[in-house]
């Protein structure tokens, strides 16, 4: 049987744990992102997201169902909020929205899609200044469980989106991201862009952030913010409260060049 694909037709599409509006939002898909259809009900479609292989239920009315998927690309929208025309009407989409669909000649014609805004081509190197610049764009963005956009984002979604700007695909959840790369033994040995992971009382990794320096971290907790970090964990710069317990630091390599 031929695969069916679901393409997101709204700026941000909630991905839920179960096929119900009240179900937990476990992730989000941005406009133009797509996945393989796994199961369908009257109102919901369970899909496997092409980018990070995450699975969940999305509302059918927020998807285009097709027997073809957009051609793979790498360019993203570059501004904080960007205008894309769909069926001749403007739609506002988040920074970091992939432009694969807009650049697909067949599908873009089918849905009347046009985009003439600024584009971000993934950067080849993670320079300290660029990591901080990209991260700071999200400062004060509200924390949202399952969020992946400028309209609300969670800790691992924030890390995933920043790394996407460098052409590095990361898994969706913090514990999955912690399985990548090499361990960095001491904070003093870290470089900007290394990922710091934090665990709960049961030892389960529940939080992640991006190191800017050996003693500064940018992460999503309440909102995207910059805090102090030491060998024990994160210290809130405003209150002095210790908020997260450091488990380990990992360095994710750049992708292999062909």
Image (tube, rainbow, N blue to C red):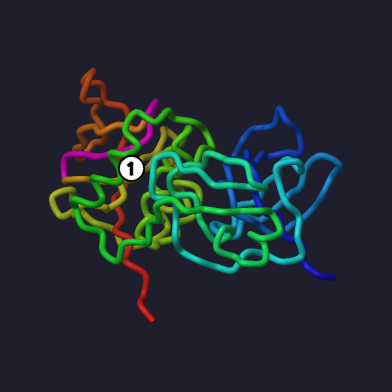
Element marked by disc 1 = strand
* 217 in magenta: yes
Side of 81 relative to 68 (left or right): left
Depth check: 162 or 196 in front? 162
Residue at 50% x, 66% y is 73
Residue at 16% x, 40% y is 215
Depth check: 67 or 15 in front? 67
Depth check: 35 or 31 in front? 31
| Majority secondary structure in the magenta region | strand
With respect to residue 180, does 11 lie above or below? above
Which residue is the site of mark 1? Answer: 209
Task: Using the rendered view, name the quadrant where residue 225 is placed.
Answer: top left
Query: Picture coordinates of residue 87 (x, y %)?
Result: 67, 47
Q: Residue pushed farthest bottom?
A: 258
Query: Picture coordinates of residue 93 (x, y %)?
Result: 51, 42
> Does residue 160 appear anywhere in the picture?
no
Label 1 packing within 10 angstroms: few (<14), some (14-19), many (20+):
many
Residue at 25% x, 33% y is 226
With respect to residue 93, does 53 lie above or below? below
Depth check: 38 or 72 in front? 72
User: In this picture, which residue range is highlighted in magenta?
Assistant: 214-223
Query: Picture coordinates of residue 176 (x, y %)?
Result: 48, 53
Side of 200 relative to 139 (left or right): right
């Amino acid at each position: 049987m031929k695969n069916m694909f679901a393409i997101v037709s709204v700026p941000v599409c909630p991905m839920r744990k179960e096929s119900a509006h009240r179900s937990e939002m476990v992730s989000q898909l941005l406009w133009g992102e797509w996945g393989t259809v796994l199961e369908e009900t009257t109102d919901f479609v369970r899909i496997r997201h092409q980018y990070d292989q995450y699975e969940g239920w999305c509302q059918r009315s927020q998807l285009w169902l097709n027997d073809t998927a957009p051609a793979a690309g790498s360019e993203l929208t570059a501004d904080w909020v960007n205008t894309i025309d769909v069926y001749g009407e403007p739609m506002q989409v988040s920074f970091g929205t992939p432009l694969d669909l807009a650049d697909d000649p067949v599908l873009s014609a089918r849905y009347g899609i046009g985009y003439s805004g600024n584009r971000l081509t993934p950067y080849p190197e993670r320079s300290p200044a660029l990591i901080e610049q990209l991260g700071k764009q999200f400062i004060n963005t509200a924390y949202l469980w399952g969020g992946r956009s400028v309209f609300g984002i969670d800790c691992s979604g924030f890390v995933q989106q920043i790394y996407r700007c460098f052409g590095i695909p990361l898994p969706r959840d913090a514990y999955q991201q912690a399985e990548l790369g090499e361990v960095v033994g001491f904070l003093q040995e870290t470089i900007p862009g290394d990922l710091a992971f934090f665990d709960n009382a049961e030892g389960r990794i529940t939080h992640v952030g991006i190191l800017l320096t050996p003693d500064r971290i940018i992460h999503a907790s309440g909102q995207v913010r910059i805090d102090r970090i030491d060998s024990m964990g994160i210290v809130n710069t405003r209150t002095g409260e210790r908020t997260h317990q450091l488990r380990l630091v990992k360095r994710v390599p750049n992708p292999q060049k062909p």
